[in-house]
Structure formats: structure tokens, C-alpha cells
Image (cartoon, coloured by chain):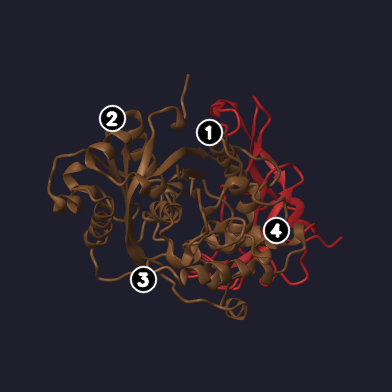
Amino acid sequence: MPEQVVAQPGLYTGTGNPPSLKGGRCRKCGYVFFPPQQYGCESCGAPREQLDAVALPGRGKLHSFATVHLHQGKGIEAPFTVGVILLDDGPAIRSTLTSRTGEGLQAGDRMNATMVSQGHDEQGREVMELRFEKSAR
Amino acid sequence: MSKTLIDLRPVYVVGIGLHRYQRMSETTYVDLGLTAVREALADAKIQWSDVQSAYTGTVFIGMAASRPMLRHLGATGIPMAQVENASASGSTAFRQACLEVASGISDVALAVGVDKPAPLAGAPGKTNIRDLVGARVVPFTHFALLCNDYMNRNHVTAEQIALVAVKNNRNGAKNPYAQRQKAVTLEEVMAGPAISGALTRLQCCPVGEGAAAAIVASEDAIARLGIDRSRAVRAVASVTRTERVYREAKNFDAELTGETVAQAYREAGITARDLDVLELHDAFTIEELLYLEAMGLCGPGEGARMIESGAADIGGQCAVSASGGLIAMGHPIGPTGVGQIAEITRQLRGEAGERQQPNAKVGLAHMVGVGAVCVVHILRRD
């Protein structure tokens, strides 16, 4: 099996079922956040010593979604669909969905994270990106 | 104890001027800005030498924009500075000019907004905090997501949201300073091209170039310079706030707008019902609905119905985006917030011609910007 790497190692490891996100939690006020950062708690101002890394399981509920029909960004091919997902562990996050056109999706759907191949890097390793898809159940 | 604008000495808008908002051209930013400032000076019937301070709202021009432009009015040596606050740069320049006059440091101050589109790497991208979507989500998709949520929660159709663009383009068609001066039908708006989610091209504001200027003055200066008091419009509230932490996917643009506008109403001693004209940050159609609700012009979920009823038309309960708003007048960034002040001043003077809201006495200008920031001003005809 060829070696795999994740596209955004700062945001997820690609392991777990469903894969988890790398979030943060403030020890002082309990605020749970994503994406992770070490500058200080946005909710109470506690410094980095008070910020713990926390794995946020890639499970939640679809809050809203939009299919992007037109995009001028380099290497970004439209159409694709972006969703706001309310993670079961708290934060609302935005993620690309596996469905390019969002067909069959509706707000309130249960969503799971999954790893999707994005092709290979220069070293021939398969690049895996985290996306969300409608839960099978 | 801290004070509000209305506790300080009165400050009035006495001169307004614009350079038409338009697609990027060969015109230099100097020509754009000078056109607006000269028009504002002529409108106030004062000389450049009467102006004691200048703030330039700009994002794209680059370092030190003010003096290379304003020296061509005569280098009088007055203090000048640039104000950058994302889409609210012009609004913030206007606030600084108001505060400077209200505090007594100057009697006459200029706020000018000028911009030309240029590539720019904003600071949020330099924090090293990455998210999952990165460049895949640009502003129109941020608002397309809010659009989807709004449609789901309120059982509103894409056509109902698109009606905002019909109204604002109808207003823009009567505004010689607007970038888009063509009325459009609902069918034309819906025909696309589709951009993101339910948003079509005509539901997204054009970002071009332009300039807008507003001169503010104290009562002393109005008397001393012989400015026509009957055309002066008082600024009675200037409020700016930034985003806090809102839990559970709350719509931060609307939350921030709601709390900023509520503070401005309190400071001015008015309610939403008192507003005759409203210029808001309608960069995308959905925003107008969200902010009408956040500002209390209608109940939660009633924004689309308010537009359909005609209550937001010129001649309705409150003329919303009578200038054409960002959607039709355009959003050249630096000028936009100052241009709103120009429109409201014109309306409160009763000089808006075909766009005139009958007997307009109170107006509100609202901008939000990346960050996120919100800036609100309330103007009143005495």
C-alpha cells in the first residue's frame, strides 16, 4: 500500500472512525474551539498555557450548505459544496462536502467526516483531505 | 465617565461630494479623490483652507494615500491620516472626523474615501490560523451559506431574496453616481449566472473604483464661514463595535449589527420606527434581509415580506438603500461608507430628486467589515 499523508496535518490526523478534528479547549472557561490556535482564548483571554489540544470527533449536524458555481481561485475547481456543520462537541465548522452539487442534502442531516484522496504529491504519496458526508444511518 | 457623540458639542455634515463609482479605469486615485473633495467644498461653499483636518478611508491604494492627493488643493499643512477598517474604512474615517469636531480639536474636518481595486493580502490570512476550507470560501459563499440557512428557517424562496436586487437596482438607476444604473427585472436577476448557492451575479455588489467626501463642521464654524444652516445635517450617533463570541452557529454579522445599532438608537434617543432612510451593507441581497431584522425594522423572519410589501421602497415606511446600496451603487470599499453619508445627507436635505424619500428627517448608515467590525451613524435634520 502506498504511503499516505493528510492535506492539513494541523487540523486533523486522518485517523479514527469517523476521523477527528484537532480542536482546542480552554481550561479556564471551558470554551471549545476549532480551528486550533495557541495565541489565547477568544472567550476569556486565558493564555496558551491554559489551552489544551482536544480531539473533536468528526460527527455533527448539517446547519446550512451552499454549492459554489463559480470560483477563480488557483487549483479550485467549481462546482463544489461547502457546509456549516454543528459538531456534536460544540463548535460550528465549515467544511467541503463529499457531494460536489449538494444533491439530496438538507439542513439537519447527520454528517460524518471522511478522508478523500486528492491525488499524489511530488514524492508519490497519496494526499488525503478531510471532508464531510451525509451519515449512512 | 465615558461620553457619546451627542454629549459632545454638535457636529454637522455641511458638504458632500462624490466621484461616480465605476469599473476600474485609467483614472488615478488622485483624480477620483479630488473630484469628490472639490464637489464637497463647493457644496458647503467653503475653501480648502477652511478645512483643519483630513481622514482618508482606503484599503487598496497603499501607504500614505492622503497628502499625495490632497496637496493639489493647496498644501495647507493640516493633519492628515489614512483609516483602514476593511469595508468600513470610509465609515470609520467619517467617525474620526466627527469625533475630532465634536471634541473641539477641529472646527472643520474632512472624511474622504477613495479606492481602486488591487490585489491585497489581508491580515487575517497572516495569523497562521488555518481552517478546513481556506480560499474555497470567499465572501459570496459566506453569505450563500447564510442565505441557505435563512431560506430553511423562514421558508423563503430564492426569488423572494432576489427581490432585494430588483429594488436596489431600481434605485441605482436613478443615481448618477451609481456603478450600476440599470433597472432589472426579477427574471433578469434569477437568470444568473449563478455564483454561489442561491446568489446570482446581480445579487452580488460590484467592486470598482470611486470616491466620496463628507465635510463636517461645528456650530462655530457654520456661523463663522457663513455656511447655509438649513442644509446642515447633524450626526447624532456614531457607534462602532467588533465581533464577540457567539455560540452555536449564531450569525455573527447579524448579531454584531443588532448590538451596534441598538447602542446607536439608545445614544440618539430613537427607535427603528423613527428611521426614514437607511443605507446598509447590502453587499449581497441576503444581507439586507438579515440586517433589516437585526435592526428591528421588521420582526425576525419578516425581512423578505417587508421587501415584498414595498415598505422598504422609496415612499415606503423607510427607504432602504435609496442610493442603490452596495448592490447597485457599488462597493469600491474605501468610499462606500462615506458615500452612504452623502446619500443620507442628500435625502435629509430634501435634495435627492427622483430618489427622494418624502419628508425624510432621520437616517442611519451601516457598514460591516472583515474582522469583524460594524460601524453605525445616525443623522438627523434639526
Closer to the observer: label 2 or label 4?
A: 2
Q: Is disc 3 on the same chain as disc 2?
A: yes
Q: Is residue B77 left or right of residue B352?
A: left
| Dot placed on the residue nearer the N-terminal end, 3 or 4 | 3
Residue topped by disc 2: B105
| Dot placed on the residue nearer the N-terminal end, 1 or 4 | 4
Residue topped by disc 1: B267
Q: Where does the image place residue B298, in percent across and percent down from the top left? A: 68, 52
Q: CA distance from mark 1 to mark 4?
A: 30 Å
Question: Quadrant of the image for the C terminus of chain B?
Answer: top left
Q: Where does the image place residue B4, in percent across and percent down from the top left? A: 47, 29
Q: Does residue B182 sit above or below B296 in this rendering? A: below
Closer to the observer: label 2 or label 3?
A: 2
- Crowding near the residue tagged with mark 1, few <14, some 14–19, many ≥20 C-alpha atoms within 10 Å: some
Please name the color used to draw chain A: red
Q: Secondary structure at mark 1?
A: helix
Residue B219: quadrant of the picture: top left
